[in-house]
Amino acid sequence: MPSSHASCTEVSADCPVSATTLGYYPNLGANVFFVVVYALCAIFTLGIGLWKKTWVFGVVVFAGFALETCGYIGRVLMHSNPWSDPGFKLDLVCIILAPTLICAGIYLTLKHVARTVGPDFSRITPRLYTWIFIPFDVFCLCLQGVGGGVDAAASDKTPIDAKTLKTGNDIIIAGIALQVVNLAVFGLFSLDFFIAARKHFKNPSEKVRNSAEAQIWYSRRFRVFCSAIACAYAGILIRCIYRVAEMAGGWGNAIMRNEVLFYVLEGAMVLYPAILLTIFAPGLYFPEMGSKAPLAPSPATDSENAVAPNEESKPVTPEEGMMATH
């Protein structure tokens, strides 16, 4: 916003709504809708996570939904006063940061799917998915947080420090762009894993067909869960690409001031993944992800534990029986 409007706190002749960063009154009905749905998703996600013992997923994704709720509360505040500083900061910080936590929940699912269906189908050890993608996501989160903090500090100055504001904006763009890269790489690993698994289970032997892994792979519940995760992933990826384009134009650019575009590419692209992750929560559709759920043994483990037919039918001599008792 121009430095002449730095002291504006409410709409007036000298402080028109067109001079705000967004340039419009955020729609009340739409934003209340987002607040209510995200709040419900947060409550149910946490509840299911605690109930089904999918602790980490439940808490991390709950935090993401809670941030989304706070962000849209900020937009509700800006409906009555587009110059609301608390409202703008809630919108800026919470809505930008929230999808990072939702992504972390998605990353967790691949680790557990790989461990359950077959670690051999993964290019890397399943536990590395969370060690690689989540820390990098946290790094992206920190970058975006720092950028938001720099922007907030620059906006508090009178007149506004335009150079510092641009620096903060560039940091946010870097954080979101790296998040897009992280998501893209994760998508490639996921695709590679599922191609390998599908090839393995496509024309299975009788032994493979009767294995615990195959029972999970062929189950309708598992397929529905994986489809929901894939759709949620696509929505978050589209949203992050939109955010890079939005922030690249600087504060108050045409994309940032397009409210309909915001609701389609930010609002809807995060809301429908939130609904999917709540309805098709791992605790309900992939219980193997729970901390108490037994993981299916890998094919290698099955072969190691299998008893050879000759050994099974071999009679035990009296001498061997006596040795076994001592």
Image (cartoon, rainbow, N blue to C red):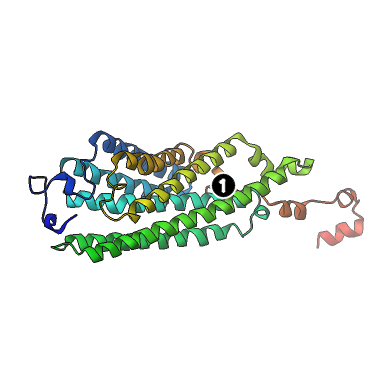
Residue that appears at 17% across and 56% down: 2
Q: Is residue 38 left or right of residue 28?
A: right
* Residue 278 % position (x, y): 44, 39
Which percent across, then down, holds residue 47?
40, 42
Q: Position of residue 92 (x, y in %)?
A: 28, 52
Q: Is residue 90 left or right of residue 177?
A: left
Front residue of this view, candidates 141 and 317: 141
Q: Secondary structure at mark 1?
A: loop
Find residue 206 and report its image quarter: top right
Q: Nearer the viewer, residue 8 or 191?
A: 8
Number of labels in the image equals 1
| Mark 1 surroundings within 10 Å by alpha-carbon count, few (fewer than 14), some (14 through 19), many (20 or more) | some
Report if residue 56 is visible in the image: no
Residue under the image location 85 percent in, 51 percent down: 308
Q: Which residue is mark 1?
A: 293
The quarter holding residue 264 reads top left
Residue 65 in the image: state x and y as whole percent. Answer: 36, 46
| As drawn, 77 above or below 120 | above
Q: Nearer the viewer, residue 261 or 104?
A: 261
Task: Work out which quarter of the rendered image holds the N terminus and state it.
Answer: bottom left
Q: Residue at x 22, y 63 (%)?
A: 162
Is 306 situated above or below 271?
Answer: below
Q: Amino acid at mark 1?
A: Ala
Q: In this view, which residue lies farthest toward the left?
A: 13
Q: Quadrant of the C terminus?
A: bottom right
Q: Nearer the viewer, residue 320 or 206?
A: 206
Residue 98 visible somewhere in the drawing: yes
- Left or right position of 309 against 58: right
